[in-house]
Image (cartoon, rainbow, N blue to C red):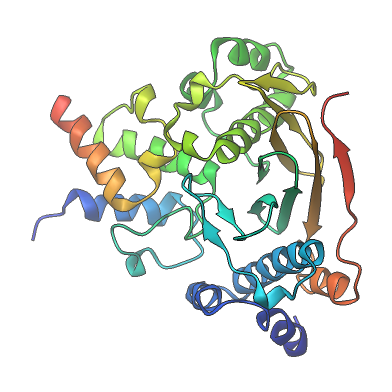
Amino acid sequence: MPDRARLELAACLAPAELERAARLRSTLDRERFLVARAWRRHALAGLLDCRADELEFVPDRDGKPRVPGSDLRFSASRSAGIAVLAISREVEVGVDVEVIRAIDDLDRLARRFMSASERAALAARPAARRQAGWFDCWTRKEAYVKGIGAGLSLPLASVEVWSGDGRPVTVEGWLVRNVRVARGFAAAIAGSGAGTWDLQPGVDREDPSELPRRFLNGVCSHRAQNRQGR
Amino acid sequence: MSVTITDEIREVLRDHARLPVEVDGLDDGADLFDAGMSSFASVNVMLALEDRFEIEFPDELLTRSAFESIASLRSAVSRLRAQA
């Protein structure tokens, strides 16, 4: 990433964010962190009509970050060069993205983390599609658990969020669904009740400077509004 | 000096947590998810701990909070080893 782009990104971050970036071992990890954090700030600041560097994040009692005095709910996740950011004014949201990678012992994972019906749905898939199915289910669970915040101590096998296909599932009033963000990645979003949210996928897999260029040019995102339910 | 549970947990984290930071630079109480451990990496940490210590995490410990720090992992591993 050019030095100028890095400086522009770093300019809106808080000292604690810069310290955290400094602890990251690789240049690529540092750049991805800077991009994701700066992006989050710019996206939220755009909606709150304030400057990105003015934003303060404070965890609420469930441990989810909030901007004090605003009604914005948001959730962010990153994996191997893909960052996703979900924002809503109407519902609580949780989001998760994972790069789909080889799993040595899928049966063992399924036994531990999936419900009986989720395991049956996974087993019914052709072998070549099981790995992607696992990640679709897993990201749904993570999105839901992140969304409810206080649910971090929830046993994941007890959270049934996946029916084996792309259909959204409702659990405890939350709507959980997969979203396609990039080839080779699984992602899911969970929203509490009826309402709308924006999910913004950011891709910095090839070139982390692509993302800052996009928002520094004032095109903050290719925002796609998704309406819950059908 | 004998190898402690904490040392072994740190070794498992080095091999399986895919952390973007040095494991040796983390306090026992540091939040591993904050440090960059993905949710799925935490699953691989769990499997590796089970193999290393010959334990099985029961459902009620398969939670995000059990995996959030070296201290929480040590507490879970110690408890499971005592029961074994």
Q: Based on the displayed image, in which of its 4 quarters is residue A185 positioned?
A: top right
Which residue is at 66% across, 17% downward?
Answer: A122
Give the left or right position of residue A151, taking residue B58 as reference.
right
Q: Nearer the viewer, residue A108 or A203?
A: A203
Q: How many marks?
A: 0
Where residue A129 sits in the image (x, y, percent)? 74, 25
Q: Is residue A209 above or below residue A197?
A: below
Where residue A210 sits in the image (x, y, percent)? 83, 70
The residue lying furthest to the bottom in this view is A4
Q: Is residue A160 above or below residue B12?
A: above
Give the left or right position of residue B49, taking residue A45 as reference.
left
Which residue is at 70% across, 67% downward?
Answer: A41
Which residue is at 54% across, 21% downward?
Answer: A114
Split into 4 quadrants, where in the image is the N terminus of chain B? bottom left
Give the left or right position of residue A198, taking residue B53 as reference.
right
Where residue A221 sits in the image (x, y, percent)? 87, 60
Q: Nearer the viewer, residue B11 or A143?
A: A143
Q: Is residue A24 above or below residue B69?
A: below
Split into 4 quadrants, where in the image is the C terminus of chain B? top left
The residue lying furthest to the left in this view is B1
Which residue is at 47% across, 37% downward?
Answer: A150
Where residue A110 sits in the image (x, y, percent)? 53, 22
